[in-house]
């Protein structure tokens, strides 16, 4: 996989999140009730060491999102999505029902739900692009930033407004080999290693207003 840089779209509304700035008035006006601001704090899953912070602004079905992730595997694509349709929270390691030591994506579904939006760097953002590894961030180092303005579907917008949307970043390296490997196949695509699609960090979007 080759590295690439995501297109940054400067948000027009102010909320501070780990040095990433989105701008918005402190109080919504009567004519601005459709605007929703939320922040996210990513915490590691599967002992990945990954973490991050960010924010989004939703107006109608248009989302301006910005976040930074640290502690991820370098020179490897990291699928990332807004998940919806479940409890709106992240699993603990107790969600590892198979007992293999890894909470895979499917085991996390009862907590964070299915893919609502694929946070690709360009092109399609639907669930169909959930494993579009050539269009997800592939950082040269262990940190990357993502910023993009995208349209979301009605169900995604509803879960964001209801505090039920969750950001999940995928891709782990439990054996510290420096690449996605191992004999265990992904629960999403058996042509990929389990490490490539298992969640590395997760955080629910918390409403600011």
Image (cartoon, grey):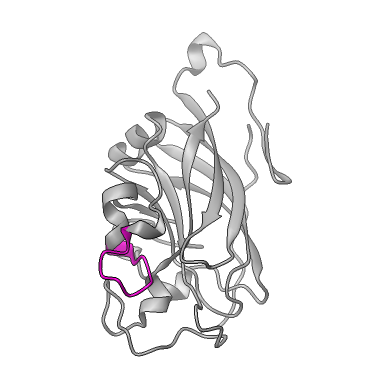
**Is 112 displayed left or right of 173 in the figure?**
left
All told, the count of numbered labels is 0
Question: From the viewer's perspective, is residue 21 above or below residue 175?
Answer: above
Task: Give the percent coordinates (x, y) of residue 203.
Answer: 48, 48
Task: Give the percent coordinates (x, y) of residue 46.
Answer: 46, 66
Question: From the viewer's perspective, is residue 104 above or below residue 89?
Answer: below
- Residue located at (56% from left, 83% from top): 176
- Residue located at (51% from left, 18% from top): 32
Residue 99 on the magenta span: yes
Residue 23 on the magenta span: no
- Residue located at (57% from left, 45% from top): 41
Task: Give the percent coordinates (x, y) of residue 101.
Answer: 38, 72
**Is 153 displayed left or right of 32 in the figure?**
left
Give the residues drawn in magenta, as a range. 95-106
Which is more toward the observer, 68 or 195?
Answer: 195
Task: Give the percent coordinates (x, y) of residue 37.
Answer: 53, 31
Q: Magenta region's main secondary structure?
A: loop
Which is more toward the observer, 81 or 128?
Answer: 81
Q: Residue furthest top?
A: 30
Which is more toward the observer, 3 or 74?
Answer: 74
Question: From the viewer's perspective, is residue 49 above or below residue 112?
Answer: below
**Is 58 displayed left or right of 186 in the figure?**
right
């Amino acid at each position: 996989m080759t590295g690439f840089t995501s297109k940054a779209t400067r948000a027009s509304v102010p909320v501070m999140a780990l040095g990433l700035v989105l701008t918005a008035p402190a109080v919504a006006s009567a004519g601005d009730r459709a605007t929703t601001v939320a922040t996210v704090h990513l915490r590691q899953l599967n002992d990945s060491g990954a973490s991050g912070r960010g924010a989004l602004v939703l107006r109608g079905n248009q989302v301006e999102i910005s976040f930074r992730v640290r502690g991820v595997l370098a020179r490897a694509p990291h699928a990332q999505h807004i998940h919806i349709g479940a409890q709106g929270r992240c699993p603990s390691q107790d969600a590892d029902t198979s007992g293999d030591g890894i909470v895979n994506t499917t085991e996390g579904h009862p907590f964070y739900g299915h893919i609502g939006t694929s946070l690709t760097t360009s092109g399609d953002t639907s669930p169909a692009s959930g494993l579009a590894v050539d269009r997800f961030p592939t950082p040269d180092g262990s940190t990357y930033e993502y910023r993009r303005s995208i349209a979301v579907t009605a169900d995604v917008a509803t879960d964001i407004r209801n505090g039920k949307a969750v950001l999940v970043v995928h891709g782990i390296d439990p054996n510290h080999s420096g690449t996605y490997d191992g004999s265990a196949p992904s629960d999403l695509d058996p042509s990929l290693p389990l490490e490539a699609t298992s969640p590395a960090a997760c955080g629910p979007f918390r409403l600011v207003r």
